[in-house]
């Protein structure tokens, strides 16, 4: 049979066939006719009306008039990337999916990261769930994992999805607010759906504002099945973890970025790939034996529950590398169509009621979004496995099916295409035994809404807890209706009484009459280690460091620190009042990358201030530079200063340093690294270690910087 070998480049080669990349020709119409003018329409006389006869004018405008397609009803804003996936070792024991057997094999993938609520042009850094959808172009057909960066979902049954989305999207009368859950209808919905509690805890945690798509997790969320060649099935959940660690923004920074650079996450992904810093994610699975299905105190089919890793460890099975940006946003990122029902032999579904509804919804939405039943023929959606069936016609059909027959069984085409046996790769659904009455109901364990929300709360560090409380204050603080605000306080009293009291304080609601709280159901799971944003703290790879300098800066200090940062994998940008060349005190020059109008502290992970008396004197007088430092400090970012650069900190609102001026400064803030005499060794190492920590949260409880 006509099977195609798939390797890392197969999808790129397939896409290339559709590239319009030839040398640019003279301008033509869509019919290939060369045109002599594309600026002035054909008129009856110089001042006369435009003529209908002007086919070029009509074609140009008609095409333009039809350029838009409906945006996705959710996840409208997204960014895509190509890459490949490689399994670490054969997974034969668990699944016979071919792309999970051979560690040598590189399966092409296309990934689309997204926000859920905002429209297509909304800002990247809003508080929201992030979509993490992966299409594997396997030799057995396309396989999609359509996941999120949060491992649980708001609701338990797909039937409620339209209600959820209507509630969280802008309100129907005035379309306010954009890309935000902070309004009455959403919290009204939440207060009436306790099953939301767990997901809300995640959404209001730092996970809701990731620093980068490259620094967030992914989860399949729903329960699926692996099936091996012997027909043995196991329940699974999918995980992705970023090699760079999990990192987030702080809320004030996220809000500012939404205005200063609303493409922050999109740009970050694009630039990382352009500069060869390919994002990498490890894929993991949690496995539960069929016979253990009912042995947990949560229902393993409930998508509002995690499988705590202490009970069901993650097996890390492979790695995905994203190494190519799309050539055309619309053709690839916009037109890509993911669907949880796109499956391959060896993987199967479960009865998770959210998943069951999803299996229907994606294909359905794509029929309208992509204009009919032939969207699989769009290049980005084409499988690498050959397609052979009797489906015909419909809008935008590209394939020219030859011969007479388009039915089965037939004799006119030698009986082909015919169904494949399982040995030939035919997909056989897992033969699960199902019995039951037709009822609208959910199982008893689904009704435990709070214990895992409590587990999440218990597992947070103090700074993370504070961020959650503040997020409640923001979100519920925007709710106009007092009874909804009270409803939220009362609902979260079921999770944790202290949390409810803290929420009530900020939002003008009464503290709960009786302090409540949920027990976590198993002693061993009072806290789960994996829930806190446990980040890798040993790398500064791809971190962006702003170097603030002015004329008369110390060139050798900059050279030394910059080299150390770049050697460690970080990136630096020189910020000064004007672009152009900057002269140092030693006569040498360097080029300025951005001026203060184009650069804001929120776009960087850390700041370095080199010495140079003249430079520091002018920076002290420059409000933008001082604001840059104050704001970065407020956002808990690492700040390094050498030589006279330390004096600039003294002129700012930075706290945690007792400035001595004679080289004996006492620094109690671990995120501030200073050295008066740059010849003293160790500055670079200490500064890099401080950047690797990402943020220095101790500051939050101590200070309020007016930035
Ligand atoms: Fe969904 C898009 C993830 C529940 C219905 N969903 C969509 C995307 C992601 C997810 C990442 C964007 C894909 C892309 O980039 O094109 N959705 C999830 C996850 C869910 C989930 C992780 C919970 C486990 N979704 C869910 C339910 C329904 C839908 C319960 C309906 C019953 N989702 C859709 C949709 C979308 C979609 C309306 C909009 C655009 C599209 O499918 O292609 O069909």
Image: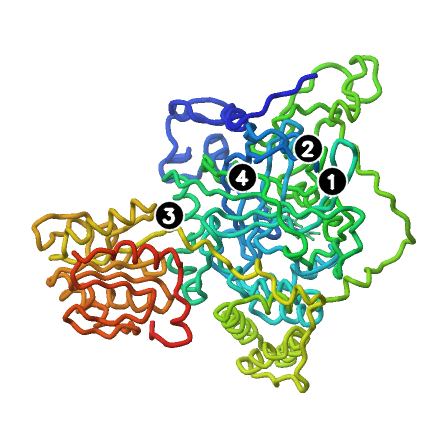
Quarter of the figure with the C terminus: bottom left
**Numbered mark located on residue 319 in the image:** 4
Q: Nearer the viewer, mark 1 or mark 4?
A: 4
Label 2, label 1: how far apart the Cα atoms are: 15 Å
- Which is nearer the N-term, disc 3 or disc 2? 2
Residue at 57 percent across and 78 percent down: it is: 503
- Judging by the rendered image, the residue that carries numbered circle 1 is 348
Label 2 residue near ligand 1, CB within 8 Å? no
Q: Position of residue 667 (x, y in %)?
A: 28, 70
- Which is nearer the N-term, disc 3 or disc 4? 4
Determine whether the residue tagged by mark 1 lies in a helix, strand or loop.
Answer: strand
Q: Are marks 3 and 1 in contact (CB under 8 Å)?
A: no
Label 3, label 4: how far apart the Cα atoms are: 19 Å
Residue at 40 percent across and 52 percent down: it is: 538
State left or right for residue 669 relative to residue 586. right
Q: Position of residue 524 (x, y in %)?
A: 67, 64
- Which is nearer the N-term, disc 2 or disc 1? 2
């Amino acid at each position: 049979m006509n099977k195609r070998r798939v390797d890392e480049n197969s999808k790129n080669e397939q896409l290339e066939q559709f590239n319009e990349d030839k040398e640019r020709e003279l301008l033509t119409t869509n019919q290939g006719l060369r045109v002599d003018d594309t600026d002035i329409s054909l008129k009856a006389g110089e001042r006369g009306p435009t003529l209908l006869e002007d086919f070029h004018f009509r074609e140009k405008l008609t095409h333009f008039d039809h350029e838009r397609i409906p945006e996705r009803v959710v996840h409208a804003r997204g960014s895509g990337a190509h890459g490949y996936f490689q399994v670490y070792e054969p997974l034969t024991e668990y699944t016979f999916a071919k792309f999970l057997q051979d560690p040598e094999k590189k399966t092409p993938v296309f990934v689309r990261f997204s926000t859920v609520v905002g429209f297509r042009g909304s800002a990247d850094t809003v508080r929201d769930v992030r979509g993490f959808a992966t299409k594997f172009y396997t030799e057995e057909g396309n396989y999609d994992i359509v996941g999120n960066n949060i491992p649980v979902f708001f609701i338990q049954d797909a039937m409620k999805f339209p209600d959820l989305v209507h509630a969280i999207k802008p309100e129907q009368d005035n379309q306010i607010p954009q890309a935000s859950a902070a309004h009455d209808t959403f919290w009204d919905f939440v207060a009436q759906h306790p099953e939301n509690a767990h997901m809300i805890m995640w959404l209001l945690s730092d996970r809701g504002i990731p620093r980068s798509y490259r620094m967030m997790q992914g989860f399949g969320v729903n329960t699926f099945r692996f099936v091996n060649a012997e027909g043995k099935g196991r329940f699974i959940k999918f995980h992705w973890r970023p090699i760079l660690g999990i990192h987030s923004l702080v809320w004030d920074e996220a809000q500012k970025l939404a205005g200063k650079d609303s493409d922050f996450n999109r740009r970050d992904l694009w630039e990382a790939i352009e500069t060869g810093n390919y994002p990498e994610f490890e894929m993991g699975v949690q496995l539960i034996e069929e016979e253990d299905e009912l042995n947990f105190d949560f229902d393993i089919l409930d998508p509002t529950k995690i499988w705590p890793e202490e009970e069901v460890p993650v097996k890390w099975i492979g790695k995905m590398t994203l190494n190519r940006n799309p050539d055309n946003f619309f053709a690839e990122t916009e037109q890509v169509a993911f669907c949880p029902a796109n499956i391959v032999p060896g993987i199967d579904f479960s009865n998770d009621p959210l998943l069951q509804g999803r299996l229907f919804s994606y294909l359905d939405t794509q029929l309208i979004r992509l204009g009919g039943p032939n969207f699989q023929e769009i290049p980005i959606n084409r499988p690498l496995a050959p397609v052979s069936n009797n489906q015909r016609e419909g809008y935008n059909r590209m394939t020219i099916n030859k011969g007479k027959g388009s039915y089965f069984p037939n004799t006119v085409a030698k009986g082909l295409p015919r169904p494949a046996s399982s040995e030939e790769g035919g997909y056989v659904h897992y033969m699960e035994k199902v019995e039951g009455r037709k009822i609208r109901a959910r199982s008893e364990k689904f009704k435990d809404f709070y214990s895992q929300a409590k587990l999440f709360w218990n597992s947070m560090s103090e700074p993370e807890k504070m961020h959650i409380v503040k997020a409640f204050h923001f979100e519920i603080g925007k709710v106009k209706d007092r009874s909804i605000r009270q409803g939220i306080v009362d609902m979260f009293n079921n999770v944790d009484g202290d949390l409810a009291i803290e929420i009530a304080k900020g939002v003008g609601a009464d503290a709960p009459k009786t302090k409540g709280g949920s027990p976590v159901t198993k002693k061993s799971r009072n806290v789960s280690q994996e829930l806190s944003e446990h980040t890798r703290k040993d790398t500064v790879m791809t971190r962006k460091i702003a170097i603030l300098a002015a004329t008369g800066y110390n060139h050798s200090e900059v050279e030394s620190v910059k080299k150390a940062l770049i050697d460690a994998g970080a990136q630096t940008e020189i910020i000064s009042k004007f672009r152009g060349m900057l002269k140092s005190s030693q006569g040498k020059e360097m080029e300025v990358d951005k001026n203060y109008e184009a650069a804001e502290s929120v776009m960087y992970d850390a700041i370095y201030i080199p010495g140079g008396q003249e430079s520091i004197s002018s920076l002290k007088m420059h409000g933008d530079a001082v604001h840059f430092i104050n704001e970065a400090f407020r956002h808990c970012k690492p700040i390094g200063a050498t030589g006279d650069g330390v004096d600039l900190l003294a002129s700012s609102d930075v706290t945690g340093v007792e400035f001595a001026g004679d080289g004996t400064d006492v620094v109690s803030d671990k995120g501030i690294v200073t050295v008066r005499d740059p010849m003293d060794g160790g500055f670079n190492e200490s500064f890099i270690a401080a950047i690797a920590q990402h943020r220095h949260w101790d500051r939050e409880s101590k200070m309020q910087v007016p930035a």
